[in-house]
Image: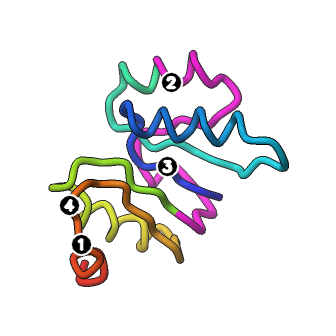
Amino acid sequence: MLALIGGGKMGEALLRGWRAAPGPGVQVAVVEPSAPRRDELAHAFPDVSIVASLADLDGVSEAVLAVKPADVASVAQEAVAAGARRVLSIAAGVRLAALVAS
């Protein structure tokens, strides 16, 4: 399962693009800590699992981090602890060395 961590504007844009792409879909779950935003996403994507934290998911193998740059290191650690073998960040200005170090 792919965990999209961060359901803000960029996370939603990624999710919309993945959903619109032809071919077999990937099982995606969105992790969004804000309850009002989770409700918005659940309404827009009724067939996608929207959860409050990574602890609410089983079988995370990959994660895309769509969070603020200041949060990338800690969220990357959480993703790896949840089982993600591959982690991708779309945060601007965060160098690979910072991800590897976390």
Q: Would you say 20 lies left or right of 102 here?
A: right
Mark 2: amino acid: Leu
Circle 3 Cα neighbour tier, 10 Å, few/some/many (<14 / 14–19 / ≥20): many
**Position of 6 relative to 71 (above/below):** above
The residue lying toward the viewer, choosing from 102 and 36, is 102
Sequence order check: which comes first, mark 2 or mark 3? 3
Badge 1 amino acid:
Arg
Q: Which mark is residue 41?
A: 2
Q: Residue 71 location in percent, x, y?
A: 21, 55
Residue at x 15%, y 55% (from the top left corner): 70
User: How many C-alpha atoms fall within 10 Å of the one at disc 2: few (<14), some, or many (≥20)?
Assistant: some
In which quadrant of the rendered image does the N terminus lie? bottom right
Residue that carries the numbered disc 4 in the rendered image: 93
Dot 2 or dot 4, earlier in sequence: 2
Q: Is residue 79 above or below residue 101?
A: above
Q: CA distance from mark 1 to mark 3?
A: 19 Å
Q: Secondary structure at mark 4?
A: loop
Q: Which residue is mark 1?
A: 95
Give the quadrant of residue 33. Answer: top left
Residue drawn at 45 percent across, 55 percent down = 55
Which type of secondary structure does the marked residue at label 2 adopt? Answer: helix
Q: What span is colored magenta in the figure?
A: 40-62
* Label tally: 4
Instruction: Choose mark 1 or mark 2, whichever is in front.
Output: 1
| Disc marking residue 4 | 3
Circle nearer the viewer, 4 or 3:
4
Q: Residue at x 56, y 38 (%)?
A: 15
